[in-house]
Image: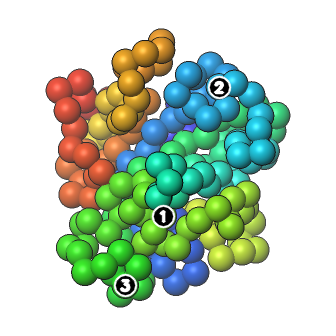
């Protein structure tokens, strides 16, 4: 839970396309039935068990890629799903990849942002911190939102089964127009 809110307002860049992270969700590996790593390591989720700072990319519903920042020590699976970005650079390329949409819809969801940035399984395991590849997690000096600007709610799309279903593990920049979904009744400021 410590890393997830600290990722807010960082910049996720892929070549010349970039966006500011405005919404994330935390996943706690073996402690979390909603995590891809809940039942242990597989070929699909191996990156989640690797070193912090890598990008874990998966394909879901037969049509969307989603990306996570690995954040727990190597050997323990823990990652933060990037749910939404505020577009910053390469908007023409994003529009081309996503179709003619309003700017706030370019990266307002985990599948949309991966499509807009050109992220797919080919970059699973990319090191976001080394600066050696096309993908990077950057800090441009914009701080995470202060407590009064930090929204917290249960994660989106997690069924009501399991002990973590209603855990407040979704973090977002309150009031940002690029959120994948506006806060519901269980959301609260931190």
Residue under the image location 20 percent in, 32 percent down: 184
Residue under the image location 75 percent in, 66 percent down: 130
Q: Hey, which quadrant is residue 28 in on the image?
A: top right
How far is the residue under mark 1 from the one under mark 2? 24 Å
Q: In the rendered image, is residue 91 in sight?
A: no
Q: Quadrant of the C terminus?
A: top left
- Please, what secondary structure does the residue beneath circle 3 have? helix
Say whether marks 3 and 2 touch (CB < 8 Å): no
In the image, residue 101 lies at what x, y percent? Answer: 23, 75
Task: Give the crowd class for mark 3: few <14, some 14-19, many >=20 residues within 10 Å.
Answer: few
The number of callouts visible is 3
Q: Judge whether 3 appears above or below 178 on screen.
A: above
Q: Is 104 on the left or on the right of 9, as rendered?
A: left
Q: How is the image coloured?
A: rainbow
Q: Judge whether 26 appears above or below 182 on screen.
A: above
Residue named by callout 2: 38
Task: Give the crowd class for mark 1: few <14, some 14-19, many >=20 residues within 10 Å.
Answer: many
How far is the residue under mark 1 from the one under mark 3? 13 Å
Q: Earlier in the sequence, mark 1 or mark 3?
A: 3
* Picture disc at residue 96: 3
Q: Earlier in the sequence, mark 3 or mark 2?
A: 2
- Please, what secondary structure does the residue beneath circle 1 have? helix
* Picture disc at residue 114: 1
In the image, residue 98 lies at what x, y percent? Answer: 35, 75
- Please, what secondary structure does the residue beneath circle 2 have? loop
Residue under the image location 42 percent in, 63 percent down: 113
Residue under the image location 65 percent in, 51 percent down: 56
Q: Is 45 on the left or on the right of 94, as rendered?
A: right
């Amino acid at each position: 839970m410590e890393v997830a809110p600290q990722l807010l307002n960082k910049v996720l860049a892929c070549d010349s396309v970039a966006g500011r992270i405005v919404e994330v969700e935390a996943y706690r590996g073996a402690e979390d039935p909603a995590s891809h790593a809940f039942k242990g390591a597989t070929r699909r989720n191996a990156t989640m068990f690797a070193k912090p700072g890598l990008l874990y990319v998966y394909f879901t519903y037969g049509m969307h890629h989603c990306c996570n920042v690995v954040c727990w020590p190597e050997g323990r699976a823990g990652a933060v799903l990037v749910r939404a970005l505020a577009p910053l650079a390469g908007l023409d390329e994003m529009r081309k990849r996503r179709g003619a949409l309003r700017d706030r819809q370019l990266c307002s969801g985990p599948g949309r942002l991966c499509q807009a940035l050109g992220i797919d399984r080919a970059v699973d395991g990319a090191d976001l911190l080394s600066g050696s590849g096309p993908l990077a997690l950057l800090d441009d000096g914009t701080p995470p939102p202060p407590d009064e600007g930090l929204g917290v709610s249960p994660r989106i799309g997690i069924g009501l089964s399991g002990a973590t279903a209603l855990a407040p593990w979704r973090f977002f920049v309150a009031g940002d127009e690029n959120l994948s979904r506006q806060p519901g009744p269980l959301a609260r400021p931190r």
